[in-house]
């Protein structure tokens, strides 16, 4: 169910599309259901169709045309129910549900031969949650909502067991109950928990599956809730990596998105943020104070105090400190991007070094080259961008500008301070600078009056 308006988020973005550790809220229960073995995934969205194009592949999106409550939302999906398989109903704003919980719910549901089974939890402060009322046999009689004054009696409000908003139903019993749900409440809505009362009154058992960890069923109503859930989600992600052989020096200052992949014996230093589809191989050293976005690292890569966005660093590469690798950058095996280096849309060859204070954009560099400090590739002429090609084993001097399009051949050299505008043949030394001349007595003449620079 993902049709709620989420007004308490105070956002133009639908609540279930708010990001939680690199994945929209609604995608978390979908991923858990898929991992649990669900045969079909159906999402019921609102009439604004804001979820179109935002759901994972293989998910069917249906629309609740009017916001008339959770039971009406499930009714919108009635045509998708399989008659011979239990139906599990999840909420798009309850993201921390796990595949294990869903499998356990289905197991309990089948084992008890219940027509419906609901997940419950005990809370010290159940304010805002629907209370679970059980009969003398331990089965659920009904759930009373507490959204408005008068919805529940004082005795019902004293109950600590609450509805977690996760259910398993036999399809036939669910469809029959949906036809008997009333909107006779303060909100004039059709509540899904009321189907449990209808099923119980029909003589069918309604079971409860109580979970010990309330964090699994926490819902998100506003941004405070979202922050609370993010802490739990982040802890789950980091603990998973640490149990898989990754060292996280300071989990409290480390943020890792849910789809990030990290190899064994990789070390994550403090104040590091790994986002999106970032992947790192084994024995990498990442951080401190480093951000990787959709970056791919091979084995034994070292990244310190740097920012990498949609780029690749292959095995043995080193980056930083204070480097910026922009999209479509490739550092091949053993290559280096050093201190205060920015590289964009470039292929840096095996073992090549760009040690410090350089900008390399739209450039292909062969293996074993070394570009001196202050190297600049001038790739934009004011109208279009052009590529620079630098061959293998090139030795670039300090403070050299390569004005694209230009090609420097293998084993060529460029002299310090040159502005290279013409190709440099293989093995040649390119010198593109004015010859130095010294003006004797310049300082004394300047102190005595204006100096005519032309006559000097």
Image (cartoon, grey):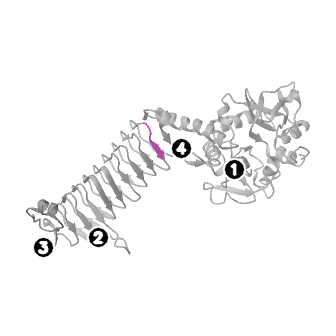
Q: Along the polypeptide, which appears first: circle 3 or circle 1?
A: 1
Mark 3 neighbour density, 10 Å: few (under 14) some (14–19) many (20 or more): few
Read off the residue under disc 1.
Answer: 10
Residue shown at the point (74%, 39%) measured from the top left: 165
Mark 4 neighbour density, 10 Å: few (under 14) some (14–19) many (20 or more): many
Tell whether label 4 touches label 2 (CB within 8 Å): no
- Tag 4 secondary structure: loop
Q: Along the polypeptide, which appears first: circle 2 or circle 4?
A: 4
Q: Which mark is residue 455?
A: 3
- Foreground mark, 1 or 2, reads 1
Q: Along the polypeptide, which appears first: circle 4 or circle 3?
A: 4
Read off the residue under disc 2.
Answer: 404
In three-dimensional space, the C-alpha distance between marks 3 and 1, rounded to whole angstroms, equals 71 Å
Read off the residue under disc 4.
Answer: 258
Query: How many numbered marks have been drawn onto this rendered protein structure?
Result: 4
- Between 262 and 454, which is closer to the camera in this rendering? 454
Picture coordinates of residue 362, whole percent (x, y):
34, 65
In three-dimensional space, the C-alpha distance between marks 1 and 2, rounded to whole angstroms, equals 49 Å
Q: For the stretch drawn in magenta, what is the main secondary structure?
A: loop
The reply, left or right, for residue 255 in relation to residue 323 is: right
**Quarter occupied by residue 155:** top right
- From this viewpoint, which residue is outermost toward the bottom? 383
Magenta extent: 270-274
Q: Along the polypeptide, which appears first: circle 3 or circle 2?
A: 2
- Foreground mark, 4 or 1, reads 1
Can residue 139 be seen here? The reply is: no
- Between 233 and 39, which is closer to the camera in this rendering? 233
The reply, left or right, for residue 288 in relation to residue 158 is: left
Q: Along the polypeptide, which appears first: circle 1 or circle 2?
A: 1
Picture coordinates of residue 159, whole percent (x, y):
81, 27
């Amino acid at each position: 169910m993902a049709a709620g308006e989420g007004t308490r988020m105070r956002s133009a973005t639908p609540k279930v599309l708010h990001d939680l550790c690199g994945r929209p809220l609604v995608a978390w229960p979908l991923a858990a259901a898929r991992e649990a073995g669900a045969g079909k995934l159906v999402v019921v969205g609102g009439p604004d169709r804001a979820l179109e194009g935002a759901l994972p592949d293989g998910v069917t999106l249906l629309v609740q045309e009017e916001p008339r409550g959770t039971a009406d939302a499930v009714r919108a999906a009635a045509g998708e129910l399989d008659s011979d398989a239990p139906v599990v109903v999840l909420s798009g704003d309850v993201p921390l549900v796990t595949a294990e919980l869903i499998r356990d719910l289905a197991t309990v549901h089948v084992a008890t031969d219940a027509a419906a089974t609901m997940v419950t939890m005990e809370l010290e402060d159940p304010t805002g949650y629907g209370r679970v009322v059980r009969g003398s046999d331990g089965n659920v009689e009904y759930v009373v909502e507490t959204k408005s004054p008068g919805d529940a009696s004082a005795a019902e409000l004293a109950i600590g067991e609450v509805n977690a908003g996760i259910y398993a139903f036999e399809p036939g019993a669910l469809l029959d109950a949906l036809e008997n749900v009333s909107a006779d409440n303060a909100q004039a809505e059709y509540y899904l928990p009321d189907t449990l009362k209808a099923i119980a009154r029909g003589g069918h058992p309604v079971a409860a599956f109580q979970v010990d960890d309330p964090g699994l069923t926490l819902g998100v109503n506003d941004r405070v809730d979202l922050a609370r859930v993010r802490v739990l989600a982040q802890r789950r992600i980091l603990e998973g990596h640490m149990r898989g052989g990754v060292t996280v020096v300071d989990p409290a200052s480390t943020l890792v998105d849910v789809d990030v992949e990290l190899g064994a014996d990789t070390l994550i230093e403090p104040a590091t943020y790994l986002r999106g589809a970032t992947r790192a191989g084994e024995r990498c050293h990442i951080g401190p104070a480093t951000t990787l976005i959709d970056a791919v690292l091979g084995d034994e890569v070292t990244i310190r105090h740097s920012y990498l966005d949609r780029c690749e660093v292959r095995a043995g590469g080193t980056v930083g400190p204070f480097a910026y690798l922009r999209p479509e950058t490739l550092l091949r095996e053993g290559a280096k991007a050093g201190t205060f280096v920015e590289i964009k849309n470039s292929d840096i060859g095996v073992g090549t070094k760009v040690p410090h204070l350089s900008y390399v954009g739209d450039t292909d560099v062969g293996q074993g080259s070394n570009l001196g400090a202050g190297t600049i590739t001038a790739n934009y002429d004011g109208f279009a961008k052009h590529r620079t090609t630098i061959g293998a084993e090139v030795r670039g001097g300090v403070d050299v500008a390569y004005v694209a399009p230009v090609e420097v051949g293998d084993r060529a050299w460029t002299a310090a301070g040159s502005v290279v505008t013409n190709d440099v043949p293989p093995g040649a030394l390119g010198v593109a600078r004015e010859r130095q001349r010294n003006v004797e007595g310049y300082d004394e003449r300047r102190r005595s009056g204006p100096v005519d620079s032309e006559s000097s």
